Each structure stands twice: as structure tokens, then as C-alpha cells.
Image (spheres, rainbow, N blue to C red):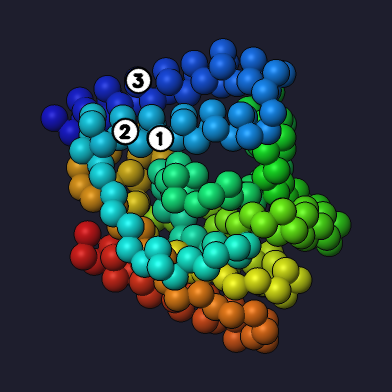
Amino acid sequence: MIWLRSCLFNIAFYGWTTFICGLVMPFVFLFAKPVGVFFVGRFWARISMAMARLICGIGHQVVGLEHLPEGPCIVAVKHQSAWDTLVFSQLLYNPSYVLKKELTRIPFFGWSLLRVGMVAVDRSGGAKALKDMLAAAKRRIAEGRQILIYPEGTRTAPGQRRPYHPGVAALYRELGVPVVPVALNSGLFWGRRAFTKTPGTITVEFLPPIAPGMARKAFMARLEEDIEGASERLCQVG
């Protein structure tokens, strides 16, 4: 039954995504303002999550939203699943994602990411890429937006860890805003590169913010300890 439901979901999800990216997004990109482009992206994510809930039985709950400060901040998120890229467009107001530059080269979809002010990073660009990322992030912060970053840079299976990239420390140092760590257990239900989807309730937990001003080494240790410790706890609970 899980396999059949997963098959139905994948057909629905990729069909829906093809419709949005192939038919709707070109029209919106050419004729709508950035706010309209962002609305379409948020709507795509909302319907995709509804499909996961109705077809596969994957729901979610959110804990600790009171830790999210008003105004601009950095939201540093554990990354276990493609689902993680959907939910934060619903939980945050107009967030600016830090994402790999390759995505922005996809016709209309990628161009739309730039249109709505996402922060693209050339992961092979060295010091110049870091400088460009910081400049773009500063513009987004000046607009009052939240910066969302996955410190590991890629999806990681539950129970596994990857080194945290230095980009999150550079953002913390240069932007001078709080960093809100976020833990989750989405990989238990929507696995990394997994065809099957398992019914259950994903938990997203916003943790107490880290105030500006910590030394780099201490900040990175605190951030990793907060995110990984809470994510491991959530994965054990299931």
C-alpha cells in the first residue's frame, strides 16, 4: 500500500510541478511583479504539501515559533528531505533562500528564483562567491527579509551529519542579526532520493535564537550542537 500511494503521489507531484514550471511560471515571470512570482511559488509548495498529506499521509507540526524574532534574521535549518524546501515558504514571511547557483540557470523556474530575491551561491567560486553571497544577503536583510540557509549544504539522512559550511558563519558575522536554529525529522517520512513516502507527522522545531556577537568557533559549535542535538531527539521520537 505504501508503494502504491507513493507511486500515485509521485505522478501527482511531478505532474503538478511540470504544469507550474512549464505553463504557469513562464507567463507569471513575463507579466507579474516579483510578489506575484513568489505567490505562485508558495501556492505550488502548499498544494505539493497537501498532496503529500492526502495521498501519503504525511502531515506536520511546528514547535517553537515563538523563538522566531520579528524583523530580519537568519534561519539555519537541518536538511533531510525535499519536503524541507516546501514548508518554510509557508512558515516564514517572504524568506530569501540561500541556494546553489545552478538552480538559477533553469529557464523560467531558475530565473524566477532570482526575480524574487533568492541568494544564489556559486559553490566553486571561492572567495568571490562568498563576497557575492554576503552582498546579496545584506540587500535582503535591508529589505527586512529573513535569510534561510541549510548549513550542511545538502540533504542528510536521519542520524547522519555533514560538516557545516563556513558560509553560515560569514552571514552571522557580517549581517549582525540573530540566527534561529531549526531542527526537524522529515527524512523519516520523505527520504533523501527515496521513492517511497512513509505516513507520519513531521516535526519542525524552532530553537532559541543565537544573538549576534559570538566568536566564529563558538558560534559554529553552538549552532551545530543545537541543530544536531534536537534533530537526533526528534528522529528518535519519530
Q: Secondary structure at mark 3?
A: helix
Disc nearer the start of the sequence (2/3)? 3
Disc 1 residue type (three-letter)? Arg
* C-alpha separation, residue under disc 2 versus residue under disc 3: 14 Å
The residue where tag 2 is placed is 50
The residue at 20%/47% (across/down) is 200
Disc 2 residue type (three-letter)? Ala
Viewer can see residue 137: no
Q: Is residue 25 above or below residue 84?
A: above
Query: Do tag 2 and tag 1 residues touch (Cβ < 8 Å)?
Result: yes
Circle nearer the viewer, 3 or 1: 1
* C-alpha separation, residue under disc 2 versus residue under disc 1: 6 Å
The residue at 24%/66% (across/down) is 236
Query: Do tag 2 and tag 3 residues touch (Cβ < 8 Å)?
Result: no
The residue where tag 1 is placed is 46
Instruction: For label 3, count other residues whose C-alpha is less than 10 Å away and answer few (under 14), some (14-19) or many (20+).
Output: few
Q: Secondary structure at mark 1?
A: helix
* Residue 18, image x, y percentages: 50, 18
* Residue 16, image x, y percentages: 43, 20
The residue where tag 3 is placed is 11
Disc nearer the start of the sequence (3/1)? 3
Q: Is residue 192 above or below residue 104?
A: below
